[in-house]
Image (cartoon, rainbow, N blue to C red):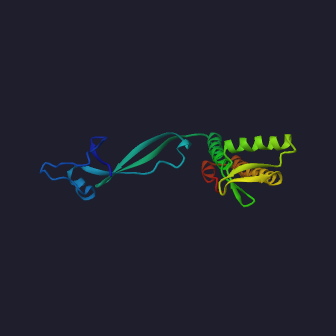
Amino acid sequence: MDIYKLEGNMLKLAPQNIVLDSGETILNFNTVANNYGYKKLISEPQPLYNERYQNLQPVYEETDTHIIEKWQVLETISLEEYKQLKINELEAIYNEYLKGDFESQGYTFGYSEQAQANFTKATALFNSFPEKIDTPWKTKSHGVILLTREKYMQVILDAENHEMFTLGKFWNLEHLVDMCKSHDEVDSINWNN
C-alpha cells in the first residue's frame, strides 16, 4: 500500500517504514497514519475507455483519514471519433480470433498467419498437381497426421467457415457501432455481444 503525505497542495510519497519521533515504526497505516499527518490515498479507477477522453485531470478530495483521487473529464472526443476507436478495438480482437484454432473432422487446427500461408501453399499444390493424393499436416490436437486430398479439402472448407464466421461477427459489431447515438451506447458494445 502506498502512503502519501499531504504537504500544502502536494502529495508526496512517504517511505514504507516511517519512523516517528518516538522511534516507533508505523505498522498499521490505516489506524496510525492519520495521527502523524499521513493519509491513505484511495485512487478511483480511471474511466474504462481512456481513449474517450482527450484530457483527464486527477482531483483530490480529502477526508479525516484518506485522500481520494478522482478523475475529472476536461474534454470528450466526438462521437464519430469514438466510434472509430471502438471499431479499431473490435478489429484488433477480430484479428486475434481469426488467428485462433478451429475444428475439422475431430482435429484442432491452428490458423495463425503462418498456418494460413501453409494452407494457401498446400491448396495451390493440390490444385496444380492432380496426382498429389495426400499431405502431412500438423494439428494442435493430434500432432502430425496424413490428410488425403478429400480430407484436406474439408479442412479448407472448415477454415473458410471459421474465417467467415469471425468476419461476420466483426461486420455485425461494426454495424452496431455505426448505429450508436451516444458514447455510452458505443461503450456497451464488445466482442462478446
Q: Is residue 161 visible?
A: no
Quadrant containing the C terminus is bottom right
Q: Pick whichever, 75 or 179, lies toward us.
A: 179
- What is the residue that sits farthest to the bottom in this orientation? 106
Q: Position of residue 135 (x, y in %)?
A: 76, 48
Q: Pick whichever, 21 or 90, lies toward us.
A: 90
Residue at (42, 48) in percent of width and height? 70
Residue at (18, 52) in percent of width and height? 25
- What is the residue that sits farthest to the left in this orientation? 22
| 79 left or right of 57 in image | right
Q: Pick whichever, 164 or 157, lies toward us.
A: 157
| 35 left or right of 90 in image | left
Q: Position of residue 180 (x, y in %)?
A: 68, 49
Residue at (45, 50) in percent of width and height? 45
Residue at (13, 48) in percent of width and height? 21
The vertical placement of 28 against 52, above or below, is below
